Structure formats: structure tokens, C-alpha cells
């Protein structure tokens, strides 16, 4: 390799390093999760954030937000507004959503074991594949909710409106499904 070829090689190598540095800087700037420190609000992305357990976030206002893949164990979200919020694949074990509004929220694949949804608005909520073991849905509105493939072992639906919901086996709950899913079979 002569002198000119060596200079060209070093120049190409330097340009590749600069390109990689710029690429990684732009990648991390555009994909940062700085919202983890942002206050709760409309449309904020909290996905993949790590939060401490047992936080009191009652009366939180976070519609259209992304809580996917987060851990909120024993969090208090009583009387919160979480309409159209994505809580999929999150860990919300023993969380409380008493009288919260989760209209059309996506809770697919999440862990909601021993959580409390008493008197919550869960109209058209998506619980597909979620773990709902010992979850309390007493007096909640689950009109049109989707429970396909969910684990509802020992879950309580006392007084819950299950009209037009899709049950764990994929069957539809007919009108008059209060406290239990009734179907035409």
C-alpha cells in the first residue's frame, strides 16, 4: 500500500467513525425516554419507564398516554382519567383503579393480579391475554371489553356490566350479562 492509498484508507475510516458517532447520537436523542421524569399529562410516553412501588397517583390525568412495558406495582390510580391509554404488557399487580375512567384503554398482556377496578369505567377496554387472577371488577362497566385468552381465576365480577363483552373463550356476552357472562349457547 502506497502513501496515497494509506491516506485514503485513513480518511474513509475516519468518515465511518464520524458517521457512526452521529448515528448513535441521533438514535439516542430521538429514542430517549426523557418522559419518565415528566409530570402526568395527556399523551405522554412513559413506556419502558421504571417507577417505584406503592405510589399514590390518585386522580391522575393521563389520557392518550403510553404506560406499556412499565412496572407500577401497588400503585394507587383511584379516580384517574386514563381514557385511550396504553397499559399493555405492564406490571400493575395489586394496583387500585377504583372509579377510574379507562374507556377504550389497552391492557393487553398485562399483569393485573389482585388489582382493584371497583366501579371503574372499562368500556371497550382490551384485556386480551392479561393475568387477572383475583382481580376485583365489582360494579365496573365492562361493556364491550375484550377478555380473550385472559386468566380470570378467582376474579370478582359482582354487579359488573359485561354486556357485549368478548369472553375468555372468544364468545360474546349477550345483553343481560350483569355479574357474569351470559351467551346464547
Image (spheres, rainbow, N blue to C red):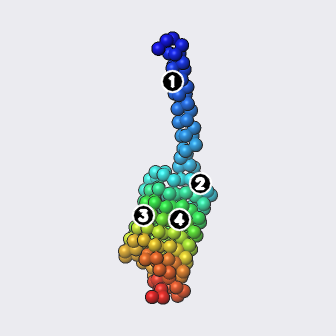
Q: Could you give the CA–CA distance between mark 4 and mark 1, rounded to whole angstroms?
A: 47 Å
Please identify the quadrant where the C terminus is shown.
bottom left
- Residues 74 and 171: in front is 171
Residue 164 x, y percent position in the rendering: 54, 80
Read off the residue under disc 4. 106
Residue 81 x, y percent position in the rendering: 59, 65
Q: Could you give the CA–CA distance between mark 4 and mark 3, rounded to whole angstroms?
A: 12 Å
Labels 4 & 3 near each other (Cβ < 8 A): no
- Residues 178 and 55: in front is 178
Q: How many C-alpha atoms fall within 10 Å of the one at disc 2: few (<14), some, or many (≥20)?
A: some
Read off the residue under disc 3. 111
Who comes first in sequence, dot 2 or dot 4? 2
Who comes first in sequence, dot 1 or dot 2? 1
Task: Identify the disc placed on residue 180.
Answer: none
SS category of the residue bearing label 3: loop
Who comes first in sequence, dot 1 or dot 3? 1
Residue 161 x, y percent position in the rendering: 52, 81
Q: How many C-alpha atoms fall within 10 Å of the one at disc 4: few (<14), some, or many (≥20)?
A: many
- Residues 74 and 166: in front is 166
Q: Could you give the CA–CA distance between mark 1 and mark 3, rounded to whole angstroms?
A: 48 Å
Labels 2 & 4 near each other (Cβ < 8 A): no
Q: Could you give the CA–CA distance between mark 2 and mark 3, rounded to whole angstroms?
A: 21 Å
Question: Which residue is painted at 50% across and 57% down in the image?
Answer: 68
SS category of the residue bearing label 1: helix
> Which mark is nearer the camera, 1 or 2?
1
Read off the residue under disc 2. 44
Q: How many C-alpha atoms fall within 10 Å of the one at disc 1: few (<14), some, or many (≥20)?
A: few
- Residues 123 and 16: in front is 16
Amino acid at each position: 500500500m502506497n502513501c496515497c492509498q494509506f491516506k485514503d484508507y485513513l480518511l474513509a475510516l475516519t468518515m465511518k467513525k464520524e458517521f457512526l458517532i452521529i448515528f448513535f447520537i441521533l438514535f439516542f436523542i430521538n429514542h430517549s425516554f426523557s418522559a419518565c421524569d415528566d409530570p402526568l399529562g395527556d399523551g405522554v410516553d412513559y413506556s419502558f419507564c421504571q417507577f417505584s412501588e406503592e405510589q399514590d397517583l390518585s386522580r391522575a390525568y393521563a389520557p392518550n398516554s403510553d404506560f406499556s412495558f412499565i412496572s407500577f406495582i401497588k400503585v394507587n390510580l383511584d379516580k384517574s382519567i386514563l381514557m385511550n391509554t396504553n397499559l399493555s404488557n405492564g406490571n400493575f399487580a395489586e394496583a387500585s383503579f377504583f372509579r377510574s375512567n379507562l374507556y377504550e384503554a389497552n391492557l393487553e398482556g398485562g399483569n393485573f393480579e389482585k388489582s382493584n377496578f371497583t366501579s371503574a369505567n372499562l368500556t371497550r377496554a382490551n384485556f386480551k391475554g392479561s393475568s387477572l387472577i383475583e382481580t376485583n371488577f365489582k360494579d365496573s362497566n365492562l361493556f364491550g371489553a375484550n377478555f380473550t385468552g385472559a386468566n380470570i381465576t378467582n376474579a370478582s365480577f359482582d354487579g359488573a356490566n359485561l354486556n357485549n363483552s368478548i369472553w375468555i373463550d372468544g364468545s360474546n356476552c349477550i345483553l343481560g350479562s350483569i355479574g357474569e357472562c351470559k351467551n346464547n349457547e
